Amino acid sequence: MSLRSLIVFFLVIPAAHAELSLSAYLEQVRTGNKAVRGAEASSRGAGELVEMGHLLLVPTLVGEAQFVDDKKPTTNPLFLGTETSFRSYSLGVSQLTTFGLEAKLSYTLTNTVLTGVSPAFVPETSFFEAKPMLELSQSLWKNAFGASTRAGQRALEAQQLATQATESYRVRLALADAEMTYTRLALARETVTVNRESLERAVRIRDWNKRRADIHLADDVDFLQSQAALEIRRLELQGALDEELSAARAFNLAREVDSETVEALVPLNAESVTGVQAPTRAAMRDDVKAAAETDRLTEAKAEVDLQTLTPDIQIYGKMAYNGHKPAEGGAISDSFTTNFPTWVAGIKFSAPLGVPTIMKSRRGEYDVKLGSALVLEHKLLEQEHGWKDLTRKFTESKHRFELSRAIELAQKIKLDHERSRLTKGRTTVFQVLSFEQDYAAAQLGRIRAEGDVLRVVAQMKTYGQGSTL
């Protein structure tokens, strides 16, 4: 047996006397259900990627090394030589800012060797050039003051937040389903117990009526009626057993255990159901958070797309200091002086010419943004309506549960009173058995009402606050 199998055995199949609590079962679902584990991992991973948009603005180290050996024929070998060897090394840092300014600071060192030139015309056949340079570029229209850059950041952030919320909601739904499955199995087992006892009483009532019919103290119709009631009890018990088996399968499926056998569960306490309160809700359910982030993502992408359709005016400038010497050290030293500066300033303009297509694309982007906003509004309305509906169901189910408990208590008092009368010889066994059946019916009614309350509470937890991780 593998180590994993041993772990599953000891975690999922404890000793027969151990009772599995709801919290322990939910932990088994978390650790055993691959869909839940996958959703948790995806949500956690998306959360760790939320700040990925900041990478658009972090400084970037850039470097280049180039080696050239050029022996192509030249028109004037006396000046140009027969071979040119060139080496270049460059290292710098570039960064994009939130307001759209692109800056690059670099340092370049080159070495040029000319072979075959006349020293009379070219005194320096080998020399070094060194150059520190600052380059700046600012867009004034497309990506005006960083609009597209910031939109790209928002898009990356919103995409990960939407994924995080979507996967978190999947976890909440799975855990809510698991909680309802636990309740379903616990109540199914209680129902089986009540129905089994009810069947035993139905047998005794049938036998009692048969004895009376055999000695002509009652009509055969009483016996036939009790026989029909017995068959109904058998049918009810079989239905309860089938429900218990189905619930057990669903119970094990949620924790990915291939078995129809489930250990003992902690019995549900009616008193705790009486005191249960509606869970605290978050301002936004996780799936609505995902819709809000999707809307933000759509808007950001539309902004980026609109920027690509916009003409561009860009101003730029360069400033460099230069060193030129036969020796490497001399060139480097000169490059840090202001003796040989280079200044460049300029402006660029570009504009797409497909005006009809541009206008149509702009309308399309606005429609996409409008559609996303409308979907979000509907999702918000749906969320509020769903919460109000669950709140109403919670109040109504709690009221039905209290009524069913009162009925159960009244039937219990009536049964106890009749049993006391039986010990005094003031009633019949048949009457006591009939009252026991009434009490069993009240128990089943209370079990159904209890299940209604707990199912609504589990559904309300999908609106819960806090992280699912």
Image: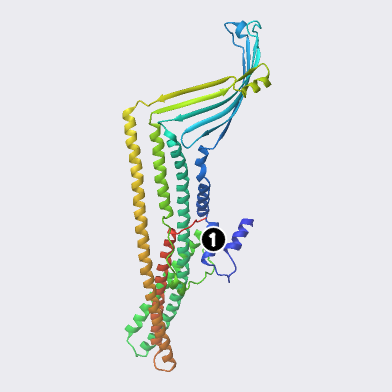
Q: Is residue 47 visible?
A: yes
Display coloring: rainbow
Image position, residue 383 (x, y; %): 37, 56
| Identity of the residue drawn at 41% across and 91% down | 421
Q: Amino acid at mark 1?
A: Glu
Which quadrant, please, contains the N terminus? bottom right
| Identity of the residue drawn at 47% across and 26% down | 316
Tell me: 55 left or right of 220: right
Tell me: 457 left or right of 73: left
Closer to us: 208 or 193: 193
Q: List the residue tagged with mark 1.
A: 27
| Identity of the residue drawn at 47% across and 72% down | 272
Q: Is residue 166 above or below residue 136?
A: below
Image position, residue 232 (x, y; %): 38, 75
Q: Is residue 160 above or below residue 249?
A: above
Closer to us: 139 or 280: 139
Quarter where residue 233 is shown:
bottom left
Numbered label tally? 1
Quarter where residue 24 is shown:
bottom right
Image position, residue 463 (x, y; %): 43, 58
Q: Is residue 206 visible?
A: no
Closer to us: 299 or 432: 299
Image position, residue 452 (x, y; %): 40, 68
Q: Is residue 194 above or below residue 367?
A: below
| Identity of the residue drawn at 35% across and 38% down | 365
